[in-house]
Amino acid sequence: MVQILQVASSSQPSAVAGAIAGVIRERKVCELQAIGAGAINQTVKAIAIARGYMAPAGVDLICTPSFSDILINGEERTAIRFKVESR
């Protein structure tokens, strides 16, 4: 099962990056989900930081973005989902 991390505009990119690195080490793949420009910005920064965390170990992270329709309080919203895995 893939670990899905929810990222908000208030999320700290370095903390999210640490979570990404931990999930990648354990499961080899991680998905992040963000809604809104601020959350997407924090997610992209976190992925860039996580690449730096993993590079010394010889792990190159790649990211594949996609759209995801989700329900929040009975309302359909479009989220951006980022699949992060090692290459």
Image: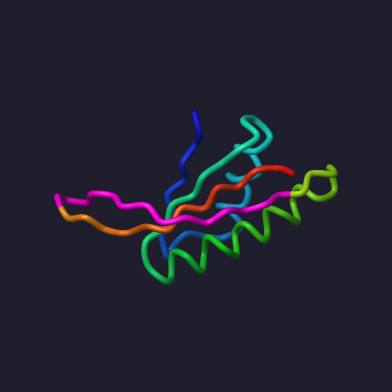
Task: Look at 52% across and 53% down and name the residue there.
Answer: 82
Farthest-out residue, bottom: 37
**Above or below, 29 relative to 80:** above
Question: Which image quarter is the C terminus in?
Answer: top right
Task: Look at 37% across and 57% down and name the residue there.
Answer: 79
Give the image location of residue 62, x and y in percent. 68, 52
27 or 64, nearer to the observer: 64
Give the image location of residue 67, x and y in percent. 41, 56
* Residue 52 drawn in magenta: no
> Magenta region, mostly helix, strand or loop?
strand
Task: Look at 37% across and 61% down and name the residue there.
Answer: 35
Instruction: Describe residue 75's horizontal placement relative to residue 29 as left or right.
Output: left
* Residue 67 drawn in magenta: yes
Task: Look at 60% across and 47% down and name the residue there.
Answer: 84
Farthest-out residue, left: 74
Give the image location of residue 9, x and y in percent. 42, 65
Which residues are drawn in magenta?
61-74
* Picture quadrant where residue 45 is located: bottom right
* Coloring basis for residues: rainbow
Instruction: Describe residue 49's horizontal placement relative to residue 10 as left or right.
Output: right
Instruction: Describe residue 49's horizontal placement relative to residue 32 as left or right.
Output: right
Give the image location of residue 70, x and y in percent. 28, 50
Q: How many marks?
A: 0
23 or 83, nearer to the observer: 83
